[in-house]
Image: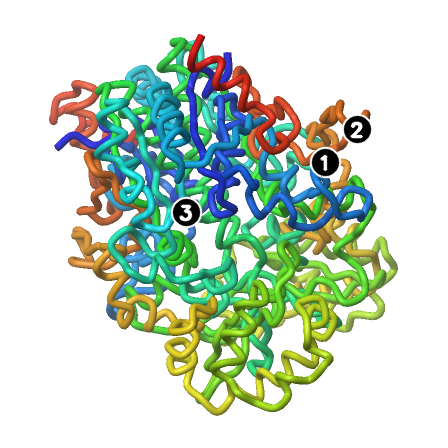
Amino acid sequence: MTALSGLRVVELANERIAFTGKLMADMGADVILVEPPGGDPSRSYPPFLDNKPGPDRSLYWWHYHTSKRAIALDLDDLEGAKTFQKLMATTDVLIEAEPRDRLSNLQLDYPTLSEIKRDLIHLAVTTHGRDDPRSDLPATDLTIMATSGPPWSCGYDDHSLPPIRGPLQGYQTAAHFAYMSALTALLYRGVSGEGQFIDVSMTAASNVSTEAATYSWLVAQKTVQRQTGRHASVSPSGETQQLCADGRYANTGVPPRFPHEFKALYDWLKSLGLDQQLPEAVFLEMGAEWQGPFDLSLIGQDDAITAIFGAGRAALQLIASSVSAQDFFLGCQQAGLAAGAVNSPEEAFEDEHFKARGFHVPVRHEDIDRTITYPGAPYRFEKTPWSIYRRAPKLGEHTAEVLAELDP
Amino acid sequence: MPGALSSFRICDFTGQLAGAGATKWLASFGAEIIRIEDPVREGRWDILRGTPPFIDDRRGIDLGGAFNNHNTDKLGITLNLRDEKAKEILAELVRVSDVVSENFAKGVLERWGFGYEQLKAIKPDIVYVSNCGFGHVGPYSDFRTWGPIVQAVSGLTFSSGLPGLEPAGWGYSFMDHTGAYYMAMAIMLALLHRQKTGEGQWVDLACSESALTLHGPALLDWTINANPMRREGSPHSNRNQWPPMAPHGIYPTLGNDEWVAIACRNESDWDALCSVIQRPWLTDKAFATHEDRLNQQDALDQHLSGWTKDQTKYEIETALQNVRVPVAAVLTPEERIDRDPATGSFGLWPTVQHREMGEVRVDGQPVHFSKTDWEMTHGAPCLSEHTMDVLTRVLGYSEEEVTQLTAEGVI
């Protein structure tokens, strides 16, 4: 028994909602991907198996369609539409990101489908919501993010450089909200027996996911400015990213604020033999021996407190420049300081912590006789574990199987 | 109208954004969220309680703008868990709750005597969701994190930047938002399981692990092809890899720190872009095919910037929208909140009533449900605002008993 077992989800193939379907499929829902007979365009997206393009070699497709079944169906064709209606009679959740009028033109919209399946949950994902004509304009992950906030806050101290987008996250943030909406509606259906229609806006999803940029404006009508490697801020803040001895960066996190943290930092500095290189080390000692809590509001006003906190930052910078990013991370954490190495994705993936948590998941690809290592679960359930149930489907791989289930 | 989740009660220890954001979602759909805070430290474990932004010159633990934003429509009570009587009250609350949620460092609830085993003994079908940076299991489970640290260790900071420069990272705690979304999912998935089977369970959420799942195909490109993201010229995160597009980037426009994003997915987008730009360089043989343009992105970006810099971002947005090229002005907070009529008409910035602050706008939800839509009406609870209400209405104490418990320092 898995959290979503027994649920049938139909996903009308579209790169904007593929991740929502994956999240549901990996928790045990029977997700049926409906593709046009020619296949979804994202089947041809790079990267490719062994770096060679070709059918069924897209790792993009492999990643976003784990645990799903796929059928090929032409919704523009009368027979195809009839089959789709039959499928909908067995469906709990429909997820689609079609142009706003497409399903009503095909007479496959929510009013029609909810006649076929009374408690259907229909999720419609558009760029700007169902009522905004801009939802029918072409858009990409980049343009969705540009209009909804993230790049304004991300980039460099040097504002002649462009604002930066963290790739994929416009789509994925919207996918998270679509998934949360589906789960919410399923819980309500569980107590009421009722389905409903849900309008998910991709730009709204990023708009409400930009932390202080939004509420600094909502609350105080102040505008944050982007800064290198740290929070965009109304007033400039100190740098937190530090180049380490191995050429990688570390995030120095929150500098010490308590006497025991100053002591741990001072001890670490001495153990590295670096205390002689830091004239401010005496203030670390003073911080370690401080009686009672520090009044942080006196930083910049009280000479002793200002010197002690300045020494904390200086010591972290000196250590970071003398050791590798990973050693800096481990040393800080052992001293009780929240700091981290700036890992690349592959470095993070190979880290012992995630390996020990079982993040490397083998998935059998019987068609090519290989077992592939996939990224694992976003959460650890005690009783209803996440799992990759099968590799991504080939075009129409389950058409016959699903049609046979509809006409037993 | 009943909310979608109004049949659920959450005994909630979450704070900051990574935890509070999860129960904010549940609250907006009607779940009863009972937020428990420490009266001795005046709830200061949640550092957002008394930090900026503020609506006026007043300061204090009930006036933090971020705290208000993340804790709408929750009830707030105080329990001094150093006191045995407070522990008894907590046990009574767990007994009538569906979920216990927290985002402390590992081990805090155990120390109070409310680890998962004890919670189960009190309420056998309880759903317990813990959320911390590295989770409760694994070699780093005792390490401390904040959103930026989670982003650094998980590769998200690295993946955002320009080649040859240090990582730009995220200008906010992306993983506090997103960790909260995964926590909300975890709570609801466990409740769905319980709805079917009657069984509760523990979910161990590690924000850094959730973050690691967000690299998409990059990790398969690593495990299968050994292609690392840390390589010459990478990342170049405004450009698109999957599918490859060119031109694809954020370009300067007329004005100070004004920008526009443009993406050409294919030949027809390129032809449409050319029809608007009409400059000689467009016919350069170097840019003849999509493949050519992918190989010449630096040169292409330079030419395109030369065109964008003399017009406003809105002029470019309109011109390219007219020919159906993906385009968007990079909007400032003011522009997307107060000048984009669509976010307002979507109801994205609801006004809530806070006991001390009065009316304040907050982040809404980016969805609408046809039958049980979300609602936000009340601001975050002031410290202990609902202790009397919860202890009398939910747990059956008399007002006199609550007054006595307050005098004894229990609540």
- Mark 3 vs mark 2: give the one in front: 2
B321 or B124: nearer the eye? B321
Place of residue B310 in the rendered image (x, y in percent of width and height, measured from the top left): 48, 91
Disc number placed over residue A368 in the picture, else none? 2
Q: Chain of mark 2?
A: A
CA distance for labels 1 and 2: 31 Å
Whether residue B408 is visible here, answered yes or no, is no
Say which residue label 3 marks: B46
Whether residue B171 is visible here, answered yes or no, is yes
Disc number placed over residue A353 in the picture, else none? 1
On the rendered image, what quadrant is the N terminus of chain B found in?
top left
In this picture, residue A247 sits left or right of residue B254: right
Place of residue B262 in the rendered image (x, y in percent of width and height, measured from the top left): 52, 71
Q: Residues at marks 1 and 3, common chain?
A: no
Question: Mark 1–mark 2 contact, CB under 8 Å?
Answer: no
Place of residue B157 in the rendered image (x, y in percent of width and height, measured from the top left): 63, 57
Place of residue B183 in the rendered image (x, y in percent of width and height, measured from the top left): 46, 35
